[in-house]
Amino acid sequence: MNQLNDLYTRLSGLAVFRGVLKLKTMGRLMDMLKEQTPASVGEFVNSLYKHGSNLSSYIIKAVTEDENTYLLRKARREPIPPVMETAVRKELGLFSEISMLTTENVRTAMGYMGYLPEWENTNLDFGAIYADRIDKLFTKGYGIFAKYTAFMLKDHVITPVLTPDPQRLSQLPAYETQRKMVIDNTLALIKGRPAANCLLYGDAGTGKSSTVKAVVNEFADRGLRLIELKKAQLHELPDVMESIADNPLKFIIFIDDLSFSSDDADFGALKAVLEGSISSKASNAVIYATSNRRHLVKESFSDRSGDDIHARDTREELASLSERFGLKVTFLKPDKDTYLKIVEYLAGQYGIEMDKDELFTKAEAYALRRSGRSGRAARHFVEMLKAGEPENQQ
């Protein structure tokens, strides 16, 4: 049995890391080891090149990102049977051996002296790297949660956001008191202490959504992740909570611009989670919602009539939804001094050099042409100056 046959046989017996073999490039590697033809080598290298030219780097990435039984037991702090520990150690040793396979090894085993494409190798300690990965499980997570920090629900599946908003807390001026409330609550979640579901409500353009996203970016390296749900997806909220319940990371379930009509079917799903239903609550997650409405529910005069015998009770239940959030943070439109403070801060960030009086006069004029003073108006104004656009351009 030549080296390639031996590696194929041993790889076929993987147990803990068997999921790695399902990756396309690893499948091409298995085909090469089994078929031992120039064509199978070309197919494998073609697939590898899509991830880079280093076989060792590709394999260690595949191994450390694999979501397997051993890793999940570690995440749940469950005891690991000695036989499973042995399997992990042996399989990591096999991956380490395969990672050093060269084109020359393949050519020799095949008895083929013609052209074969080459790849690179790096001598890595797979055992030490994986042990370090397990040690950092509660801050780095596993699977897609180790690679990305922001997610959305797409076709009932938690899907990563490839280019999330890079907003940082240092880029958000004013509203320090409000942001501190959100930060303190988030830190409680990260540290495993009781944390409240949070409603950020107030005027448009005051930085409610930016605050949530900036907080996640600030503490992502401490194991914080964000999953954004649209209002129409709230009926899936219990399933999302259940799917992350055993995850070692901490999650903010983010619902932006939340409001309900009086007969909204999604009302019940959110209410159940906010009330801590056993079937919907996850101890490692909180809900952060933003809204321009204090009571979240749109109510018309026609809602006050109808055939509901207990109409008043129904209205009070709807109106009290916001009270089910343990933390409520109010963002109101800034007064003139605060607005100009925001403008001055952002102008400094963007490197705009302008006489302060002129800057403030133009900023006020811009706010008057728009919907009034707000953090969003300040940012748009400064971005317009940076771009060199005429100040009266819409």
Image: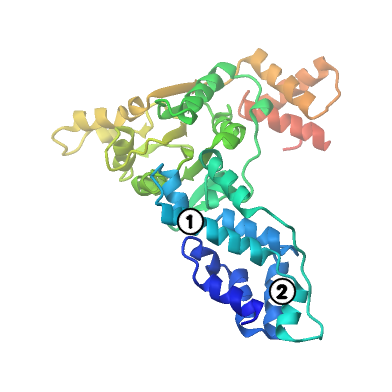
- Residue 46, which numbered label? 2
Q: Which residue is pictured at 81% across the width and 86% down the height?
A: 114
Q: Which residue is pictured at 58% across the width and 53% down the height?
A: 64
Q: Relative to the observer, which residue lies in front, 92 or 256?
A: 92
Q: Position of residue 107 (x, y in %)?
A: 75, 80
Q: Relative to the observer, which residue lies in front, 123 or 260?
A: 123
**What residue is pinned by disc 1?**
86
Q: CA distance from mark 1 to mark 2?
A: 34 Å
Residue placed furthest toward the left: 309
Note whether 269 is above or below 276 in the view shown.
below
- Closest to the camera, between mark 1 and mark 2, is 1
The kind of secondary structure element at disc 1 is helix
Q: Position of residue 308 (x, y in %)?
A: 16, 37
Residue type of the residue flagged with mark 2? Asn
Q: Which residue is pictured at 32% across the width and 30% down the height?
A: 321
Q: Position of residue 87 (x, y in %)?
A: 48, 59
Q: How many marks?
A: 2
Q: Which residue is pictured at 61% across the width and 15% down the height?
A: 335
